[in-house]
Image (cartoon, coloured by chain):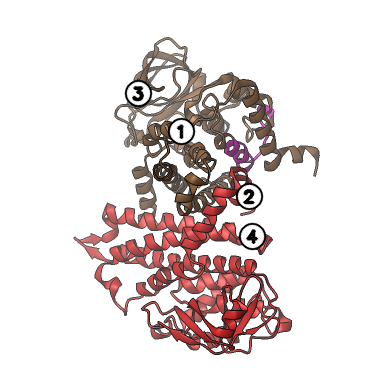
Chain colours: A red, B brown
Amino acid sequence: MNDDLVALVADITSSLSDDQKGMRPTPLWDTLAELGLTTITVPEQRGGAGGDLDDLLTVVRALASHGIDTPLAEVAAACWAHPADTTTHNMPILVTADISEDQAAQGFTIPSVPWGRAASTILVLGHSRAWEVCDFDPVFADTPLGVLCNLTVAGGVAKPFEPTVTRRAAEARGALLIAGRLTGALEGSYRLTKGYVAQREQFGKPLLALPAVAAHLARIKISLVESDVALAKAADDVRSDPESWTAAAAARVVTAHAASEVTRIAHQLHGAIGTTEEYSLGRFSRILWAWPQAPISAATWADRLGVLAGTAGEAELWGGVTSPRIIL
Amino acid sequence: MSTTQQQDSPESLRVVTRQFLDTWRTEHGDFTRPDNWMRGFDPDFSRGLSELNLIGLTWPVEYGGRGLGNVARLAVTEELLRVGAPTGAHWIGDRQIGPSIIRHGNPTLREQFLPAIIAGKFTFCLGMSEPEAGSDLASVKTRAARISGGWIVNGRKVWTSGAHHATHMYLLARTADGARKHHGLSEFLVDMNSTGISVSPIKDIAGEHHFNEVLLEDVFVPQARLLGTEGEGWRQVTDQLAFERGGPERFMSSYPVLVELLTAGPEVTDGVRHELGELTARFSTLRQLARRVAAALDDGTAPALEAATLKLLGNTFEHDVLGVAQHAYAIADRMPGPRYFDALMASPGFGIRGGAAEVLLSMIARQEVKA
């Protein structure tokens, strides 16, 4: 991880008031944009900030570890995939889905679009075609989690474009960054919970003195270590081959499990205070609840890995898919 | 890259190991069984590995080792576990006794033991657990009393895997009553043919014999067989545990069942596609975590947290493989093969041996309280 970037994110987030740390794009977004953090990995000749995927992963993870969810990964992905300079668009978002010519002509729905409510442009990357959509209606936008919503697009609105990346690469990258976001939120939830049970006293001593509480906290730590290892392998794999998806898929599956385990335990250990709007645990929980479902969902990635395991044979599973990386 | 470096790379070690396993299978028949790293005792097999210099990989060259790292060793142990190879004759010596002798033993002990373990001549069992000292290892009551020229040992060890085959026992015994029970413990390397040692079997739930009770009655252990420093046994033995806990055998005991399931065809695997995907993701992560533990050992640190995490996650994975297999065969209306039942019978041991799950969890919890 790039320590300078981690420090920069800590600096930005420390100056925010609590109501500015919400999930929706806020003045924070302008700060991130001014610093060039919203277009990491986008080539400079297309208006981007340059930098590599590790830099982007570091920023996404660090923001989530402070309880902040932003469209950083999805916007950077859109600008990365479009041949023109789209950094001037307000908020382009990349999704992957196969839209046929007929659908484009007659209108279609894109399910579960991250940041659909705030997006200005949606880039839809399919296996053979890619579409740019500037006019759409969010539906079911008022889910409590807010991040995902369905978008309906009228016939004839979608315009084809020639993407600079493959769908496979976009999916692998997307999976890696969601796993990074979740790992960051897991770290934040762990830190907050540990601080709380060490400080909050009941029965005349800190909650942490209860063995059952300490064991719960240990479970959170174990989930965090597992997620961190899965993420590191995914980052290594995608770095060496942008279309390599299995480690990113594994990281999605592992972080989704961890998210479910950790939110459950963290809320249990916090008691009633954790359920309030004003207390900050909810910010981590929202990230941890929302993103496992984001397309392509962790469940879908598990299915894909399962199909591969069932068809590729043990030799491929052993020597390829699950083979550890030498570099840590 | 020189030829030696190429031969020593994890990838070429994998190739050599696989070639050996293929040849062995051709010449001696199928050996694959779940949990066979612990249950499968075959000195010829171990000597075969030894001839290819695949035992003692991490040990100094002067004692017959290859001076490689734990990351390189992991390539070999993974390949052995993958096919459920019978490694019980050398596993304990290779994994933890050799490294412990290298860390704490004097040159004489190293000279005496390391080449013999590598050659497959010396086979070790672990004299740790006792009737009153299971997870609470520091409570051992077996006593070594000083006499002229050495020690007289009296006590009883239990759950001693492979004691009926072993030439030597690693023994943890009390040499003094310290202020705390962690004080006054010492480690010894004991000949199993010493007068006063008797071994009796404790059959397991499947009726198999790998556990034993070992009675030590006035057993003379020469002074030279003290490992390391008298009274420092606790500190020394906890060093061993990172080696004992953080390896791939902690998540691969049931792997042969997974292999069998994957080859059972779509009529069995289609019903558990999702579950197989989840197992794949977890397995991939565990392999990477084992790599992280090995790299930390190579850096000279004792990765206690990572090793405990690996064992906890790994033991759950070993169980879950069986759960998925049971589900898959049940909905396909097929009977699982013998590997499944072998692994099922072995499964209660997964989370107990080498540090019980609850103890590891509270160890991690204690670190949380401290930090």
Mark 1: few/some/many CA within 10 Å (<14, 14-19, 20+): few
Mark 4: few/some/many CA within 10 Å (<14, 14-19, 20+): many
Mark 3 secondary-structure assignment: loop
Quadrant of the rendered image containing residue A198: bottom left
Residue mark closest to the camera, 1 vs 4 = 1
Q: Tell me, yes or no, whether dots 4 and 2 are on the same chain.
A: yes
Mark 4 secondary-structure assignment: loop
Q: Is the Cβ of the residue at disc 3 closer than 8 Å to that at disc 4?
A: no
Mark 1 secondary-structure assignment: loop
Q: Chain of mark 1?
A: B
* N-term mark: 1 or 3: 3
The label on residue A244 is 4
Location of mark 3 (residue): B142
The label on residue A265 is none
Mark 3: few/some/many CA within 10 Å (<14, 14-19, 20+): many
Residue A211: give x, y in percent of width and height. 28, 52
Q: Which residues are magenta?
A: B62-79
Q: Tell me, yes or no, whether dots 3 and 4 are on the same chain.
A: no
Q: Is the Cβ of the residue at disc 2 closer than 8 Å to that at disc 3?
A: no
Q: CA distance from mark 4 to mark 2?
A: 10 Å
Amino acid type for the residue under numbered disc 4: Ser
Amino acid type for the residue under numbered disc 3: Thr
Location of mark 2 (residue): A320
Mark 2 secondary-structure assignment: helix
Q: Chain of mark 4?
A: A
Q: Quadrant of the N terminus of chain A?
A: bottom right
Location of mark 1 (residue): B337
Q: Tell me, yes or no, whether dots 2 and 3 are on the same chain.
A: no
